[in-house]
Image: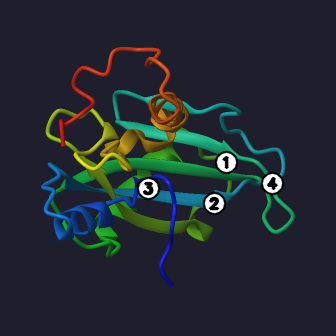
């Protein structure tokens, strides 16, 4: 049913574009289709314990902790297709990702057991997220983080919380607001 609140925050990934459009807002968002593999780590796996970025190959490796339902895993993410609107797995992209990851960390685990993923990450032309108020006093934006969503999440949430509570922003908001 209808939701009543003092404030609303639009932070719905690529869905934000259509939701905002229904309100007459044009958000400068475009999709970055990214790919990842996630595999269970082998016993005694030789794999990074912290997030590692291979700048030469433009790949990121992150060890994911075990949960009640899942063992420790290694996530490998890379590549981007700009402007693609679907989340279909592209086999050649996954094959390339698997080959590069196997070459870098052959003892991490069984890469044939890796789960493939493709998703759309909303980005802006400047590469900066959009964080702040709209022309409606109670609608706020926190979107457009591109491939750095998890990296920027805590800082973006802090900036938005500061604005919502009427506090001065802890950093300059230049380039992060659209004046909507």
Q: CA distance from mark 2 to mark 3?
A: 37 Å
Q: Give whichever of discs 4 and 1 has the lower sequence position.
A: 4
Q: Mark 2 sits on what residue?
A: 39
The residue lying furthest to the right in this view is 68
Q: Toward the viewer: 163 or 116?
A: 163
Figure quadrant of the C terminus: top left
Horizontal and vertical percent for residue 172?
A: 33, 15
**Is mark 2 in CB contact (under 8 Å) with mark 3?**
no
4 or 1: mark nearer the eye:
4
Q: Is residue 155 left or right of residue 108?
A: left
Q: CA distance from mark 4 to mark 2?
A: 12 Å
Disc number placed over residue 66 in the picture, else none: 4
- Is the Cβ of the residue at disc 4 closer than 8 Å to that at disc 2? no
Q: Secondary structure at mark 1?
A: loop
The kind of secondary structure element at disc 4 is: loop
User: Which residue is tagged 3?
Assistant: 8
Q: What label sits on residue 108 in the rendered view?
A: 1
What colouring method underlies this structural image? rainbow
Q: Which of pointers 3 and 4 lies earlier in the amino acid sequence?
A: 3
Marks 2 and 1, how far apart at CA: 9 Å
| Residue at image coords 47%, 39% | 60
Query: Do the residues bearing badges 2 and 1 touch, measured as CB atoms within 8 Å?
Result: yes
Q: Are marks 3 and 4 in contact (CB under 8 Å)?
A: no
Residue 16 lies, with reference to residue 159, above or below; the image says below
**Mark 4 or mark 2: which comes first in sequence?**
2
Give x and y (percent) for residue 21. 17, 65
Q: Secondary structure at mark 3?
A: strand
Number of residues whose C-alpha sits closer than 10 Å to that of mark 1, classed few (under 14), some (14–19) or many (20 or more): many
Q: Quadrant of residue 145?
A: top left
């Amino acid at each position: 049913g209808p939701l009543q609140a003092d404030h609303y925050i639009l932070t719905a990934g690529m869905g934000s574009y259509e939701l905002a459009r229904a309100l007459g807002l044009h958000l400068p968002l475009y999709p970055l289709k990214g790919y990842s593999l996630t595999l269970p780590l082998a016993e005694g796996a030789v794999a990074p314990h912290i997030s590692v970025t291979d700048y030469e190959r433009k790949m990121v490796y992150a060890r994911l902790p075990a949960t009640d339902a899942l063992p420790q895993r290694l996530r490998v993410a890379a590549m981007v297709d700009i402007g693609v609107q679907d989340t279909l797995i592209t086999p050649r992209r996954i094959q390339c990702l698997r080959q590069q990851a196997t070459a870098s960390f052959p003892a991490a685990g069984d890469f044939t057991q890796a789960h493939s993923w493709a998703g759309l990450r909303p980005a802006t032309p400047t590469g900066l997220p959009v964080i702040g108020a709209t022309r409606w006093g109670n609608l706020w934006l926190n979107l457009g983080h591109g491939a750095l969503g998890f990296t920027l999440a805590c800082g973006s949430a802090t900036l938005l919380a500061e604005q919502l509570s009427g506090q001065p922003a802890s950093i300059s908001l230049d380039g992060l607001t659209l004046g909507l």
